[in-house]
Amino acid sequence: MKTDLFQAPDYYNIDDLLSDEHKMVRNAARDWVKREISPIIEEAAQKAEFPKSIISGLAEIGAFGPYIPQEYGGAGLDQISYGLIMQEIERGDSGVRSTASVQSSLVMYPIWKYGTEEQRKKFLPKLATGEWMGSFGLTEPDHGSNPSGMTTNFKDKGDHYLLNGAKMWISNSPFCDVAVVWAKNEEGRIHGLLVERGMEGFTTPETHNKWSLRASATGELIFQDVKVPKDNLLPNKSGLGAPLGCLDSARYGISWGAIGAAMDCYDTALRYAKERIQFDKPIAGYQLQQKKLAEMITEITKAQLLAFRLGQLKNEGKATTAQISMAKRNNVDMAINIAREARQILGGMGITGEYSIMRHMMNLESVITYEGTHDIHLLITGADITGIPAFK
C-alpha cells in the first residue's frame, strides 16, 4: 500500500497564527486523511464509488457540523477550525469534502439556524454522528445560477404539505436520510422543508458517468405528490436569503478546502521534481520548473492568508456574502491552476492514478462551478463594489 508522504507547506508561518486547539483539530484531520483516505481514494475514484465506510471516521474528526453547539451533537468549534478540517479533507479528495460540506453547512446549518427546537433535537445529533446523512435541494434542471426561478412547489393540504418538483446535481442524494428542500408555497415564497427517506413519492436516482467527483455520490431529488408533515417546515427564515445563507457557510468551507487540494498538488510536484532526473540533474534544478513551483507556493500562501482573515471575520460575525464569494472564487481558481501546472511537472505520470494530481484537477472542475459559478462570483464582487448588479 502506498505511503502518504504529504508535508503541508507553510511559507509564511501561518501556524503561528493558529491556536493550540486549531492545530490539534487540524492535525487530527490530517492524520485521519493519511490513514483512512489516501490508501483507498484512487481506487474509489477509478470505480466511481463513494466509500461509505469513511462516514463514521468523518464524524469522529468533527467534520459533521463542527461549529454546531455541543448540546445538539456538534463539536462547538470556531469557524477557523471548520475551515482547517475542510482543508485537510479536500487535501484527500474534493468529493469527500463535498460530503462533509453538505452535511455541515447545507443540512445541519439550516436546521440549527432556521429550525424549531424539536427539529434540532430530532435531526442534529444523528447527523453529527453520521447515523443519518443529509442532502440539500436547491438547484433544478432549469434553474442553477438563478435559483429564484425554481418551480419545485408545495401546497397546504390542511394537515400536511403536498410537494412536487425535482432537484439535480445533489451531493449525498443517493443515500441521504433527510433532504433540506427549498420550494415555493402557493404565494411564491421560498421555504425549507425536511423531506425524509421513506416518504411516499420521494426518490433519489443516482447520477452516473461523471468525470469529476467520482468518489462522491451525486443524484437527483424527485418529489411526486410527497406528503410532508407540517412539523417538517423550517419556520425561522424564508425567502431566497434562507438557502443563500447556507451557501455562504458552504462556500466559506470550500475556500479552505481548495487550499488543501492545491497543497497536495504542489507537494506532489515538488517531491517529484526533486527526484526526477533529466539531462543529468533533477528537473527541480531547471528554471522553468522552479518558476512553476515558486508561483504555486506564492499563490497557496496568498490563499491561506485570505482564508484565515475570512475565518476571523466569520468568527466575529462580520464576513459578508461578497467577501465569501471572493475567497471561494480566488482559491478554487488558484487550486485548479496549480493542479494543471503540477500535472505538467509530472509529464505523462501526471495523468495516472499513481499520483493524485489528475483526480484533483478533474474534481476542481466541479468545485469551480458548484455553489456559485466562477463567473457569478466575479459578478457578485462587481455588484458589491459598484452597487450595480450585472446579472439582473
Image (spheres, rainbow, N blue to C red):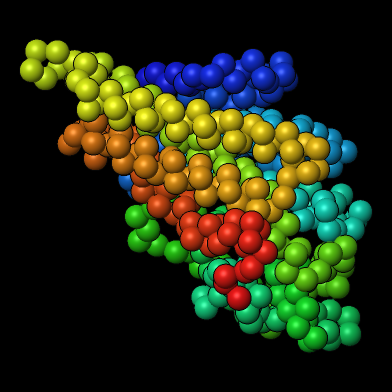
The reply to whether residue 288 is in sight is yes
Left or right of 109? Residue 255 is: left
Does the image show residue 131? no
In the image, residue 309 sits, relative to residue 205, either above or below, namely above
Q: Residue at x 77, y 56 (%)?
A: 110
Q: How many marks?
A: 0
The x, y position of residue 329, in whole percent, is: 52, 49
Q: Residue furthest left?
A: 279
Residue under the point 74% across and 40% down: 314
What residue occupies the far front of the structure in this picture? Answer: 386
Q: Name the residue nearer the viewer: 85 or 382.
A: 382
Asked if residue 182 is positioned above or below residue 106 in the image, the reply reads below
Image x and y of residue 102, in percent? 62, 51
Q: Farthest top residue?
A: 280
State the residue lying farthest toward the right: 117
Indicate the position of residue 24 as horizontal and vertical percent values: 67, 19
Q: If the image is split into quadrants, where does the N terminus sit?
A: top left
State the quadrant of the C terminus: bottom right
Residue 236: percent from left, percent from top:
88, 63
Q: Residue at x 61, y 36 (%)?
A: 307
Q: Residue at x 83, y 72 (%)?
A: 229
Please state which of residues 287 and 194 is positioned toward the viewer in this rendering. 287
